[in-house]
Amino acid sequence: MKVFRMLGRSIRDAFKSVIRNFSLSLASISCITITLIIVSIALIASFNVENFTTAIERDMTIVVFLDSDATEKEIEQVEFDIKAIENVEKYTFQTKKEVKERMQKESEVFNTVLSSWEDEESPLKDTFQVKVKDIEKIKATADEIKSLENVSVVRYGEGMVDKMVTAFSSIEKVTYGVVIALVVVTVFLIINTIKLTISARRKEIGIMRLVGASNITIKLPFIIEGMILGLMGSIIPIVLTTYGYLVFYKHFDGHLYSKLIQLITPEPFIYQASLIVLGIGILVGMIGSASAVRRYLKI
Amino acid sequence: MDLIRIKNVEKKYKNGVTAIYDLNLAIEKGSFVFVIGGSGSGKSTLIKMLYREEKPTKGQVIVGGLDVAKIKNHKVYKLRRKLGIVFQDYRLLPKLTVYENVAFALECIGEKKDVIRVKVLKALEDVGLKNKVHEYPDNLSGGEQQRVAIARAIVNDPKLLLCDEPTGNLDPEKSMEIMKVLESINENRGTTIIMATHDKEIVDQMKKQVITLKDGHLVKFKQKGTYAE
Ligand SMILES: Nc1ncnc2c1ncn2[C@@H]1O[C@H](COP(=O)(O)OP(=O)(O)O)[C@@H](O)[C@H]1O
Ligand SMILES: [Mg+2]
């Protein structure tokens, strides 16, 4: 009960101070807002990239095309060699006939073109579809298979994923830098806001100490003030990213460019992201106010 | 029984000034004690050591059986809750009413609203300000403001009331009013009162115990003393 009374008092005092130092409070809140908008965009982007790169990686297969004139024995040898490769998780074999049937099913255009071909003149080839254990070593594995006898071409989704991941990781680094700089500025602004509150309430603090207020009672309103600044600063970013992501998701129909790049379903993802943004906001506010209290409230 | 025992206390400030030299004192529970002496004689320093605003550099300051110097910084509030303290400059919050100023002391320690109400009204009655409950400090005379400060100091029923020149800003008539209030608190509530002053009139009229300091040395401790001898 006593704890609740003290907490209620602290929250009331904190709100009063936010209003009293309105311009500096507003500066702090704006700075948190900008920081958190960037943080939440980065957050949503990185979760999505993480999501679809793993999805793509999970899906990634080496397609091994065999020479058209390879005999059954030679094919068996290739299979034996593929099996022996350390990084191969599993593989399936598709004859050119199966490939043809699959492609015919997939598209009308293919269907008409392919039907006109006899088996002998078909440009299609027998293939192995190979899945690897370690995606990082996919290039080495592909090269190894390519060097086998009777293998004509080897293909895998090279490039795309790699490029995306490297592009994103450099964007990520820049974002980290910007966010860190912004957090530093924000904390600095909050420290100054709280410093102002503390000096405006010097007399009150002195009396509190005389009448036996505990240190935590004296400090709490200032800490809470910082948390309120953080909380207020996270409102706009949360609203913006929640609606922004919903609109974005609807607009692109849940995926980018191809079905391979799936976006994360908004619910419950946006709520989790909002919670993280709110948490960061309050934490930054608390760090600022706690260090102001430590510096300017020597008790 | 002694409420306060001061043993071999020395206080040397960081700048090298020694404000108290080898002080030994025992003050009984329920007594009313003046601490007198010229400016710079160490009166305020003695008071400050009693509420642990300053620590002695040597010796022990024991209040209610507790060695005050040994209290850790973050535990000082526990001592303060058992004391009331009054200063020359009142130290009221101008934006709060008389009632709110007194209630503030109890709110700070997490007291319940209904308990606060009862205690605050009782304290204001004891200092004769029940009719000024809703006034703001700026609308009160100096004597009245000091009585508000006294009410705030006694509102939590402290065993000990420390006053550092409470009449320093008041004319003789108002000063005597304050002294009447303090005397009645001492008699009716049984609160031990230690009051630093250099007001000769008051000390001579009140006929209480007198501790005389001179340049940091205790020169006299008399029952029913006067300022001069
Ligand atoms: N915070 C302080 N730092 C250094 N010296 C102090 C401090 N407070 C008081 N003094 C010195 O200690 C001596 C006693 O001061 P004080 O206790 O205030 O005397 P009084 O209250 O009797 O006038 C004086 O010489 C004063 O200058
Ligand atoms: Mg003094």
Image: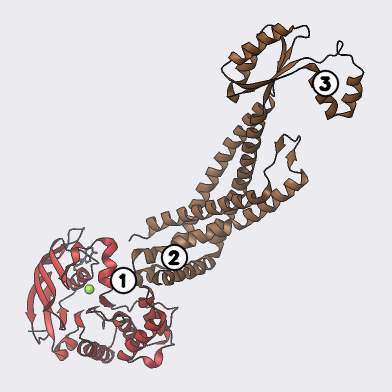
Which sits in the foreground, A215 or A247?
A: A247
Which sits in the foreground, A294 or A47?
A: A47
Mark 3: amino acid: Lys
Where disc 3 sits, the SS reads helix
Residue A221: which disc?
Answer: 2
Marks 3 and 2, how far apart at CA: 73 Å
Q: Chain A: give its colour.
A: brown
Which residue is disc 1 drawn over? A212
Marks 1 and 2, how far apart at CA: 16 Å
Mark 1: amino acid: Gly
Residue A239 locus on image (x, y percent): 66, 56
Look at the image and tell me whether residue A199 can be seen. yes
Left or right: where does residue B173 sit relative to residue B214?
right
Where disc 2 sits, the SS reads helix
Q: Residue at x 29, y 82 (%)?
A: B154
The picture quadrant where one finds residue B92 is bottom left
Q: Chain of mark 3?
A: A
Q: Residue at x 44, y 62 (%)?
A: A222
Mark 2: amino acid: Pro
Q: Residue at x 77, y 46 (%)?
A: A251
